Image: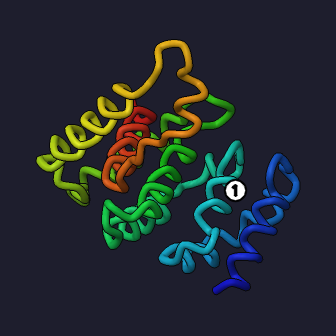
Amino acid sequence: MKCLHAIYNYLTTLIWNHPKNKSDLTPNLRLVTKHLRWNIGVADFIRELFKNNKLLIKTDMSWFIEMLLEEIRQKSPSDYYASKLLDIFRMLTLFNEKGVKRNQLEILSVFQRTKFQIIDLSRLDDHLSLYARGLQKLMEGCPPDRHQEYFSRNKLLITGELTFVIMLFQAFSCLI
């Protein structure tokens, strides 16, 4: 697995801001999706591969959307990797910072067709109140004139579930 992780890190670096390399590696998308179940760098590679890749953005990606959704379903919302996978949907909906209507509609269609339910939003209140209490406690000890210094030393942990919900709302905001 470490070898695959190193390979995906290398490939991600190879295609970062390099359209020619992206187009050369685009035909291998089906091959690399087989590794999505493991957190070995393939999600970062796919995100970068989709980023401003006209060839991928303009082709029918319904097979990929359904496969990605199934991978996300198999993960726990508390798993940070599920949030990373969810962020790939955002890349599918944008090209040069503009929405890609076709993909937005396709993702919405797949969500509706598969009755997309992967997180119990009734538990969201618990996570938000836990986060709010932590933030309030953190703010109580903060001197008014030393915010930067104080927050660089004192961290507020965000749960995996809350990260997942944030990414879910980001993905859905791109569909509007």
User: Foreground residue, 23 or 167?
Assistant: 167
Question: The disc labelled 1 sits on which kind of residue?
Answer: Leu
User: In the picture, residue 118 is in which quadrant?
Assistant: bottom left
Q: How is the image coloured?
A: rainbow
Residue lying at 47% horizontally and 63% vertically, measured from the top left: 81
User: Foreground residue, 153 or 135?
Assistant: 153
The image position of residue 119, as x and y in percent, is: 23, 56
Q: Name above or below for residue 62 compared with residue 122.
A: below
Q: Name above or below for residue 14 compared with residue 139.
A: below
Q: Name above or below for residue 154 compared with residue 4.
A: above
> Which residue matches tag 1?
49
Under circle 1, the secondary element is helix
Residue lying at 53% horizontally and 22% vertically, measured from the top left: 147
The image position of residue 1, as x and y in percent, is: 63, 86
Pick the quarter of the image with the C terminus. Answer: top left
The image position of residue 52, as x and y in percent, is: 70, 42
User: In the picture, residue 49 is in which quadrant?
Assistant: bottom right
- Rate crowding at label 1 as few (under 14), some (14 to 19) or many (20 or more) other CA atoms within 10 Å: many
Residue lying at 35% horizontally and 70% vertically, measured from the top left: 75
Residue lying at 79% horizontally and 57% vertically, measured from the top left: 22
